[in-house]
Image (spheres, grey):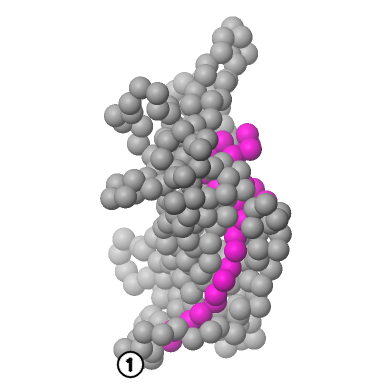
Amino acid sequence: MSENTLKLEKKIFITGEIYVKTGIHIGGSSLGLSIGGADKVVVRNPLDNLPYIPGSSLKGKMRSLLEKSYGLIEIKYQEDNDRKTRWTGPLCQNPDEPIVKLFGFPAEASGVLNPSHAPTRLTVRDCLLKNENELAAAENTDMYCTEVKTEVSIDRLTSAANPRNFERVPAGARFTLELILDVYNVDHDAKSEIDPAQHYLNLVREGLFLIEDDYLGGQGTRGYGQIKFIIENIEEKSAEDYRKGLRERTPSLYSDLFSCFTLKDLQPTEA
């Protein structure tokens, strides 16, 4: 086998749910809104019209917070065309950083890519609404399974008010959660006693902690997007299981790493 060969050893599945503690807004297209709707709508599945959390939103937030936590983002001061200034910085692209290995590294345009720099090891599925009937039956929702919250921004120079309506998935909503970690042969280092799977799972756990103490979606500094992760199962399948055509997953030895993500932190009225 060539030293540049990349071989899958196993997949580890982290499944559970996301509990929404404060209204969450992850924006969708605002085209074609009817009168009386929201200025900023949430993203919805076009087939069933249900709000959902894109896997890209959850994965991007996790990566961003982890890179900030480890000081991997080089920031620069930038002035936009609208004369607004902000701090910006690209994602870390050092292929030797564990966070980059976990979330992905762009392949080189030419030449052989080092197999340890695999495109990504973490897959984040779209998070689908679980309690549609409960939200649809709620008396005080404004749109299907959502609420509309009015925000007013004040021009600091003219004192003019600029009201805007944000559609939010209300507190109490529950979404599915599935994260999949790929473990490869190149993740093992003969000079190190560190279990590579546990190392990456520790990063995933840390990312979930960071999101819980931050927010998901837009307008988070105004109270939106506080969530709670509830991990129900940690399971895995080896590459050999796939070759044998086995459908079942086996319980993982890493389950204790996520035992802290339970319902016990929720208030009685929330659980």
Where disc 1 sits, the SS reads loop
Does the stretch in magenta take in 125? no
Which quarter shows the C terminus?
bottom right
Q: From the image, tell me which residue sits under label 1.
A: 244
Between 29 and 36, the one nearer to me in the picture: 36
The answer to whether residue 43 is left or right of residue 165 is left
Which quarter shows the N terminus?
bottom left
Answer yes or no: is residue 107 visible: yes
Bounds of the magenta span?
Answer: 212-239
| Image location (x, y in percent) of residue 166 | 49, 31
The answer to whether residue 65 is left or right of residue 183 is right
Q: Residue at position x 43%, y 56% from top?
A: 128
As shown in the figure, which amino acid type bears the numbered disc 1? Lys
| Image location (x, y in percent) of residue 29 | 35, 36
Q: How many marks?
A: 1
Does the stretch in magenta take in 223? yes
Q: Residue at position x 60%, y 64% from top?
A: 230
| Image location (x, y in percent) of residue 107 | 36, 63
Density class for disc 1 (Cα within 10 Å; few <14, some 14-19, many ≥20) is: few
Q: Residue at position x 40%, y 27% from top?
A: 37
Between 229 and 35, the one nearer to me in the picture: 35
Answer yes or no: is residue 89 visible: no
Compared with 38, 28 (above or below) is: below
| Image location (x, y in percent) of residue 209 | 65, 59
